[in-house]
Image: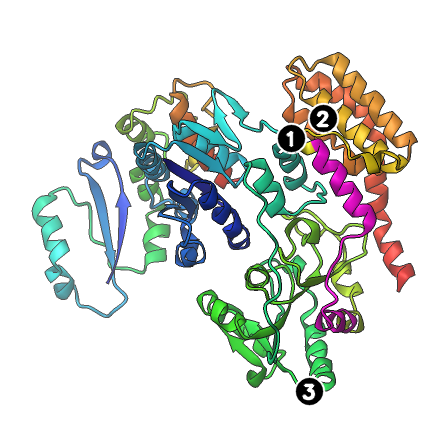
Amino acid sequence: MKILVVSLLRLGDLIMQQPLLQMLRLKYPEAEIHLLINRQFASSKYLVDNYVDQFHFFDRELYQRAMGNIEYNILYPYQHLNDSVQKLKKEKFDLAINFTHNRLSAYLCGLIDAKEFKGAYYKQGKFVGINNRWMHYFDSRFSKNGRSIFHYVEVLASSFEFPIPPRVYPLSLENKKNIYIQPLTSDRKKNWNIASYQSLLQQLKKKYSAFNFKILCAPFEQNLIEKYFSKDDILVLQLVELPELLKNARALITGDTSIMHLAAQNGVPVLEIAIGSADVCKTGPYSYAFRAIESQISCYPCQHSESCFQVSHFCAHELTVSEILNEFQLLLDENYHQDSVELKNEKEIWQAYLNYKPCPQNLLNQEHTLQIYKYTQVLGDLLRQDNFGPEQAQQIVQLIRIIKSDKQDISFIFNPLEIIQHTNYPNLESLAIHLKKATLEITDQVVYRQNNIEVEYAERN
Amino acid sequence: MNILVVESEKETVGEDRIDQFFTQNNLYQQDIDQVKIITEVEAHSPEVLEWVYIHRPLVISENKELIAFLTGRQSESIPYFLGALDLHIAQIPKTNEVLSIKHLMQQLKSNQLQEEQKQIFQILGELIK
């Protein structure tokens, strides 16, 4: 059996997908597994090559460069991409699995002519392949700014019917004295103030003299880092050197970075400083040994693809050094992150729904959770009706009214865009009009919330 | 020596492609003339337009119109490029602008392209959003 996995996102996603590839290998031990990744990560393929027989590369940067430069033949990217697609077709894959879940990867998967598909692909003018409840959940919660109570790894594994990879337990921490700090992320809005890191390092050194603290950075970050830290405190490393370094790490303090995922996979306790678009529930460290400090500002977490729209980077400013120090002490005490009882219950209910199972009996008595279950069931069933039409749209409008009158967090249960994008309703314009009235109030609430963030921030400080 | 290759179609210049060479060293012209690839091109390509001994950005900026023509980014030359790949895109806008994939994307629906060809353009379209 020949399987192609399509993974065309960023490096952090590829690292998070490592346990999924492991599960795929377990499920199909005899299969020949091929992985398609962006060419820019070709040098990082060692991170997953235990589970992959052959790599293919997507020349994203080349295509972008060729499209923007007049010295390239206007059809060069077309021709190059067409050649790559033909090569993939010749492999005659039995199964193509789309981990990426965006339009680009769906178009690409649709061209490959595999015998079977898992995940989104494009055929005969339609996006198809989102054919179980987990995939619908993934589609609505992980594209744009949906909220998820499950981790990316859990949702992907369930969507593709793999066993859910176990979270990693911490390795023995005895005699480990090295604490690493990675201040910079790949996205400015996920960076805590670098001057605050400077102050944090000073205080950590003062308070924990038995440990060695080092600031980590990549070669291209070195100039900036050297403006804030002495050379003795800095370790400049390539990604390939990190797994070895992490073997002797006692802990890592970081924003949402690739090294965070690597550390989690290697059982290194992680303290994540989650601001901007970093969402701990969705893409935090996939291990048991972590703590996360999250911004409490209402616009957090923001959308990944958009830059910060606030007049100031409030989510970064509001987190103080002393808060980070407190969290770090808890991490050292091995007092790791735990889901609240409410969240555990909510997860159970959603899992029951998403796995097509009845709601657990012990939770049926809890009015709040039962309501969520009911709404989820009704909405989910409405959306998946083949004959979705004005009547169903009207029912959804009714449902929104009921949810709102019940004072549930409507944005969590319901996203109007999901309905517009993922139903078979033939007249989207008319559906949009149906929904507009019901959603107007939600839109107002969002605008109101955004306008009040500055006030809220000023009051809190 | 860095070599800038401007890809083109036969019909636009009567040759497979136009090669432009530029150097970062202070080579004398007679040294450049000895470079194997140049002598080969001269031997087999009687229609070489010119050798340009200037910095790369200048090559681009001073020959923008010519390069755009040679690479199919002008209304007059693009049909040759589409024809070579058997792409049936009619109604390319008559414009003095330098054409890009975006201009082709706008024409996808109304043209006789196969589904697969459209889909490849759609992938490229996702990269320029």
Q: Is residue B75 above or below residue A246?
A: above
Q: Chain of mark 2?
A: A
Q: Residue A209, which numbered label? A: 3
Q: Are marks 3 and 1 on the same chain?
A: yes
Q: Residue A133, which numbered label? A: 1
Dividing the picture into quarters, in which one does residue A102 lie? top right
Residue contact between numbered discs 3 and 1, judged by CB atoms under 8 Å: no
Q: Residues within 10 Å of mark 1 (few under 14, many from 20)?
A: some
Task: Left or right? Give the position of A44 relative to B14.
Answer: right
Magenta span: A325-353
Q: Residue at x 72, y 76 (%)?
A: A200
Q: Is residue B69 magenta?
A: no
Residue situated in front as seen by the camera: A112 or B23? A112
Q: Residue A380, which numbered label? A: 2
For the N terminus of chain A, the image quarter is top left
Disc 1, SS = helix
